[in-house]
Image (cartoon, rainbow, N blue to C red):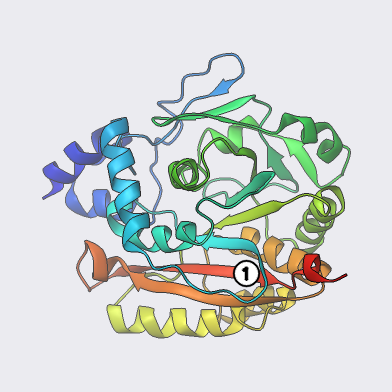
């Protein structure tokens, strides 16, 4: 099993030496060698985990993503969709849940996508931006909306940090799903290496002020509870979803402190929740919740995956 996993995802490149390490990496962990396979070309950021978290072969990757999106249901949402939360493990584990998140935005008309991910390796006092023109995946190059970088970098809450991207899988695994659901869309990729409320509030306020008159979809990359037995994982995730459903950003950080919220992507989720508050308040719809025990792993120690949509009042209908 370990050999087949490593061959399927190229996980040997990431140092998988046994089944538990391979499964931990793909379910929701991180590779010690993330970034080792990055090759820089002028203006293009190359993929870090292609062949590990998802297939490097573009035909296989396209088929896998399309299958996950096709298998998901389309949910009637209240109001206008502002953002989605999507998991970031290996596709055999979290791809079906991710399909539910991206199914809701597939084919819609947006000016750009703000894709936000946590940092599993670094901590810093600012949100990280990527100073590249394109982000490449096996499905092609995604244009980065660099025209917004100068304005964002004027804020004390943003900085340019390629190092954050060169060692992070949670950003990249969202992108093939985005390429299939919204082909050609420009992105602002942001990595959030902090849970400091001041920095996260400033990040959200800066984005809201800059983009409030644009049609933007915000994407938060996050898994849920990690490595608990199946039933305990589900109970923990239900508690997290209950707190998330209150749509109060302060509750998320309080929940992390008191143990009622477990989100490895708490920071990007927080920013979407804060932008919803700045937009007049939002509503959360749980699209899908499952864990690695439901998809491709055993039930002894699982990782939870939630697909969530956040909507706000659609003022475009008001005259």
Viewer-closest of 151 and 31: 151
Which residue is situated farthest in the top direction here?
42
Q: Can you give x and y, in whole percent of width and height, for residue 179 in the image?
A: 48, 40
**Relative to residue 60, is residue 102 drawn left or right?**
right
Q: Residue at x 76, y 63 (%)?
A: 275
Residue 142, above or below 90: above
Q: Is residue 158 above or below residue 244?
A: above
Label 1 environment density (alpha carbons within 10 Å; few <14, some 14–19, many ≥20): many
- SS at mark 1? strand
- Picture quarter containing residue 133? top right
Q: Is residue 1 visible?
A: yes
Q: Is residue 297 above or below residue 245?
A: above
**Does residue 95 appear anywhere in the picture?**
no
Q: Quadrant of the C terminus?
A: bottom right
Seen at 80% across and 61% down, the residue is 201
Give the percent coordinates (x, y) of residue 173.
44, 45
Which of these two is toward me, 25 or 7? 7
**Residue that carries the numbered disc 1 in the rendered image:** 310
């Amino acid at each position: 099993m370990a050999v087949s996993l490593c061959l399927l995802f190229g996980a040997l490149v990431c140092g998988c030496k046994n089944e538990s390490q391979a499964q931990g990496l793909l379910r929701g962990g991180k590779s010690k060698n993330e970034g080792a396979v990055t090759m820089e070309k002028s203006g293009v950021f190359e993929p870090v985990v292609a062949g590990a978290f998802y297939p490097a072969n573009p035909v296989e990757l396209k088929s896998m993503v399309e299958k996950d999106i096709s298998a998901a249901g389309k949910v009637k949402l209240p109001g206008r969709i502002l953002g989605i939360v999507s998991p970031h493990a290996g596709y055999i584990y979290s791809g079906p849940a991710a399909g539910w998140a991206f199914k809701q935005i597939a084919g819609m008309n947006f000016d750009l996508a703000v894709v936000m991910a946590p940092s599993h390796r670094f901590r810093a006092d600012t949100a990280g931006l990527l100073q590249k023109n394109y982000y490449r995946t096996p499905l092609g190059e995604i244009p980065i909306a660099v025209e917004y970088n100068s304005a964002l970098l004027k804020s004390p809450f943003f900085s340019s940090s390629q190092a954050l991207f060169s060692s992070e899988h949670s950003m990249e695994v969202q992108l093939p799903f985005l390429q299939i659901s919204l082909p050609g869309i420009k992105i602002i990729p942001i990595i959030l290496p902090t849970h400091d409320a001041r920095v996260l509030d400033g990040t959200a306020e800066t984005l809201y002020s800059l983009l409030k008159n644009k049609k933007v979809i915000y994407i938060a990359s996050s898994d849920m509870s990690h490595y608990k037995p199946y039933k305990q994982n589900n109970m923990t995730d239900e508690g997290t979803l209950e707190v998330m459903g209150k749509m109060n950003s302060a509750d998320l950080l309080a929940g992390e402190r008191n143990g009622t919220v477990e989100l490895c992507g708490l920071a990007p989720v927080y920013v979407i929740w804060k932008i919803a508050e700045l937009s007049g308040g939002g509503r959360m719809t749980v699209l899908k919740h499952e864990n690695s025990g439901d998809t491709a792993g055993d039930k002894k120690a699982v990782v939870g995956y939630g697909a969530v949509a956040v909507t706000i009042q659609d003022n475009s209908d008001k005259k």
